[in-house]
Image: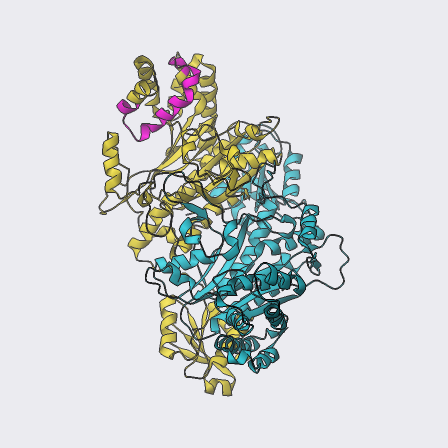
Chain colours: A cyan, B yellow
């Protein structure tokens, strides 16, 4: 286990996971959505908050912060600095960056002034940030909320407001060194979080484009064909093929030729084989892409992580801006699955190389090559949440060390004076907001909220210049001279 | 100094501050706005991001996180739990909560579905959260961004997207105990941050309403008169009076009678005097309010903070939802001010009691009394930022402990293997993304970014099974057996 792994993540064997089933027709899919209680994007929720969003209770926030801390610890281990950008972006900055995702962008009403939208991801704002500030070299992470008018599937951790945790390396460097580090990061995070078995699928946009070219697809149809290929992890090949021929207008022969390639997956052996492929090896794009992949796998071998990495030609990733290596991590279902309602999760991390995006924001088109990865924290969170629920762990939501209490009436003054001394000494202290609370209620409050110590002052203690310090767990009580109280509390709370 | 105060806040004597001057006519004010380079809300910025928002560079984020950590430490010291709510709220939830602030709410375009808006503060979402979840008792903090279509004044720390840091206590408790704690928190935070002298102005909505009543103002004009009184900190009385008579339709005599009260400020003595006031003492609202104030000041005396607290009848606070005690903290200008461009700051914290707000969100109107405070982190941040700039402190933006380096060519494999070992051991490590970087460049990178150690592997070290560990500051180099490297790095970096 890595140094710094958080204890809550180590509870029991990981919760079993089910891959989402793949219903075969759109109608079946729609029926399944309805059955799973997905909110329609048009139906108001009547819950008081927008559909597809949620409030986070204190217990949620504690767990989420532990999870984010584990992810950020990994980003810092790799030397990244943090930036932050506004949730609001100029609408023109987001247009044309997201392919079919564009229709999911939240736009603000024109209330006079600039036309605004909510950010859709953290990658486009990062590229804009680099271009605006003329930065040509940066390793940064960014943990923040993004917004998509998507069909929410909250049981699977898909929301309209959700966190992304992005790590990106910008700069002109030698090939595949930063790309390999991004995959190492995915491997570290998914291992640290002990989410069970996982697989990182890797491919390369140039290889895919090379495949399209040798299969006789016109270049104008590369992007749209790409987004159809990307559905291969959710639909069978027959369906993907019929979308290619029906919706995208490819010839059945071309689709079949594509099918021969995109159903392949493997490791270095597959790369070597494709480098010998009579058609692909003649294509400049494919050859370059395969060269990159070969070098990447050599580096991944040095990192010792190839066991969890699969070169998978069906991986395409929908976003327009990728130009090189692309990847996506999925959790694998456990074999012995006996839990009634397993959490189904799909992709939990994804990313790739986007060498052209920064240039689009630069007035002179200056390019800054980039590669990065985004961790799908919401999906991981729903697994961890379920795991904590199953374990019965009671999550403490406050850090209070001492309750200042009184054993009888007319002592509000004594409590206020004592608690003020503790706060001023940096001790985390609470008191009940009643003038004359019962001692039993005060001690009960300690037990309910996990406060380890009670500092009790009554008339006798005031006269004697002491405070009765009670260990809530053992119920032991000791009189401590008032001037030594702070030191004694600190001593008792030392780890 | 409180335990946990952060070192960066202790730099030199605090930066001098100037209160914003008060030009006397709207035209003068507009000219001054233009001179100070405030963006017009309609003019596009051509900077690539929305006017009134900003990107945060790594150095910004590091400073901001230190500041937020100091504020959150105080909230936790007082036993608060964290919640989080969506940035998006249903528009209907925000309507009618903010008085004149309503026109500053950002609305989302109707793209089909619910009508949405961006949150304007964290108080209304908290009240909605309590009502929706039927919570009658909670102490929570919330640190998050809020959105206002305000006229930005970025030099003074006023933005359209900005952080709020809120602490609130909800529940039916004995009078003034939670209210006093909120003021204690403001006092602790402003003292911890060492921002120079400050004053917490306190008043009570019922006293103000009592004053209006005994001055003959009809109840229907209480709220609107309140928002005019609130301007007394920015305009002279004459101007406030003429707004009352001209815009708000009060009689000149009534305005004059109000003027006699709202220009008063003091401490317990003033409260006692007003309790004897022949007119006010006959008014039920005022009498109750003054009783609350008396108790509040008794508690503040126990906390030892009355020196920084002023009962100020001109304080009104614009928001509609306050029902009891209200307060606002301002930083006071230093006397000996010799810096060329001092940061002008106004209010740096504010809050009060709002006993009716939660009931507005409950279908049965069940009330949950609340009191809270919001820390104006952006204004404080602009002071700290200027202070760090003046001090010349170089803020480190990464935490990297070791650079993995090589002294000559053809060693990328050795570097990748070694850095992978360090990452897996939890060491924060970087390497340069070149296949064959010069040693001098690698060591220069350590100095530029503050990396304390370099782990150097060349052919000789590989043969000997060692790594050359270099202390970047002293330039001392020692060969360490490979298997002892991790322990040696940990030992060297111990605090």
Query: Quadrant location of the C terminus of chain A?
Result: bottom right
Q: Residue at x 47, y 63 (%)?
A: A168
Dominant secondary-structure state across the stretch colored magenta? helix
Decide whether residue A461 is among the magenta residues.
Answer: no
Decide whether residue B224 is among the magenta residues.
Answer: yes
Q: Viewer-proximal residue, A238 or A325? A: A238
Number of marks in the image? 0
Q: Viewer-proximal residue, A253 or A306? A: A253
Which of the 4 image quarters holds residue A25? Answer: bottom right
Residue B215's x, y, as percent? 37, 14
Tell me: A242 left or right of B192: right
Which of the 4 image quarters holds residue A189? Answer: bottom right
Query: Quadrant location of the N terminus of chain A?
Result: bottom right
Q: Which residues are magenta?
A: B213-240
Residue A161's x, y, as percent? 54, 48
Residue B395's x, y, as percent? 37, 59
Q: Viewer-proximal residue, B298 or B266? A: B266
Placement of A342 over or under B227, stated as above or below: below
Residue B319's x, y, as percent? 43, 30
Q: Residue at x 35, y 49 (%)?
A: B384
Q: Viewer-proximal residue, A284 or B280? A: A284
Residue A457 shows in this picture: no
Placement of B93 over or under A81, stated as above or below: above
Residue A44 shows in this picture: yes
């Amino acid at each position: 286990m890595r140094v710094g792994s958080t204890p809550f993540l180590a509870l029991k064997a990981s919760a079993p996971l089910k891959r989402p089933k793949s219903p075969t027709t759109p109608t079946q899919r729609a029926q399944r959505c309805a059955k799973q209680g997905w909110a329609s994007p048009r139906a108001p929720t009547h819950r008081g908050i927008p559909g597809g969003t949620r409030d986070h209770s204190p217990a949620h926030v504690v767990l989420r912060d532990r999870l984010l801390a584990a992810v950020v610890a990994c980003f810092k281990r790799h030397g990244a600095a943090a930036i932050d950008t506004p949730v609001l972006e100029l609408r023109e900055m987001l247009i044309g960056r997201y392919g079919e995702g564009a229709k999911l962008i939240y736009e603000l009403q024109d209330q006079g002034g600039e036309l605004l939208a909510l950010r859709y991801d953290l990658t486009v704002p990062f590229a804009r940030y680099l271009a605006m500030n003329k930065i040509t070299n940066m390793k940064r992470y960014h943990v923040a909320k993004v917004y998509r008018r998507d069909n929410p599937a909250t049981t699977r951790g898909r929301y309209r407001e959700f966190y992304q945790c992005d790590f990106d390396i910008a700069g002109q460097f030698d090939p595949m060194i930063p790309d390999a580090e991004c995959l190492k990061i995915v491997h570290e995070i998914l291992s640290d979080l002990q989410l069970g078995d996982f697989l990182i699928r890797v491919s390369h946009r140039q290889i895919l484009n090379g495949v399209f070219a040798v299969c006789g697809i016109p270049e104008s149809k590369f992007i749209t064909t790409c987004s159809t290929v990307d559905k291969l992890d959710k639909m069978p090949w027959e369906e993907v093929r019929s979308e290619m021929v029906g919706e995208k207008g490819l010839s059945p022969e071309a689709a079949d030729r594509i099918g021969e390639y995109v159903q392949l997956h493997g490791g270095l052996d597959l790369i070597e084989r494709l480098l010998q492929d009579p058609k692909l090896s003649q294509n400049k794009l494919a050859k370059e892409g395969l060269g990159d992949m070969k070098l990447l796998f050599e580096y991944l071998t040095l990192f010792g992580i190839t066991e969890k990495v699969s070169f998978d030609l069906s991986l395409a990733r929908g976003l327009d801006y990728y130009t090189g290596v692309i990847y996506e991590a999925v959790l694998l279902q456990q074999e012995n699955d006996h839990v009634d309602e397993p959490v189904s999760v799909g992709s939990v991390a994804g990313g790739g190389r986007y060498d052209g995006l920064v240039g689009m924001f630069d007035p002179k088109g200056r390019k800054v090559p980039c590669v990065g990865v985004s961790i799908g924290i919401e999906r991981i969170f729903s697994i961890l949440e379920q795991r904590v629920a199953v374990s019965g762990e009671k999550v403490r939501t406050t850090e209070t060390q001492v309750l200042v209490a009184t054993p009888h009436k007319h002592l509000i003054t004594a409590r206020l004076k004592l608690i003020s001394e503790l706060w001023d000494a940096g001790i985390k202290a609470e008191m009940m907001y009643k003038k004359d609370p019962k001692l039993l209620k005060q001690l009960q409050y300690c037990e309910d909220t996990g406060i380890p110590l009670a500092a009790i002052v009554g008339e006798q203690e005031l006269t004697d210049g002491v405070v009765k310090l009670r260990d809530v767990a053992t119920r032991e009580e000791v009189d401590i001279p008032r001037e030594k109280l702070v030191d004694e509390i600190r001593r008792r709370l030392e780890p």
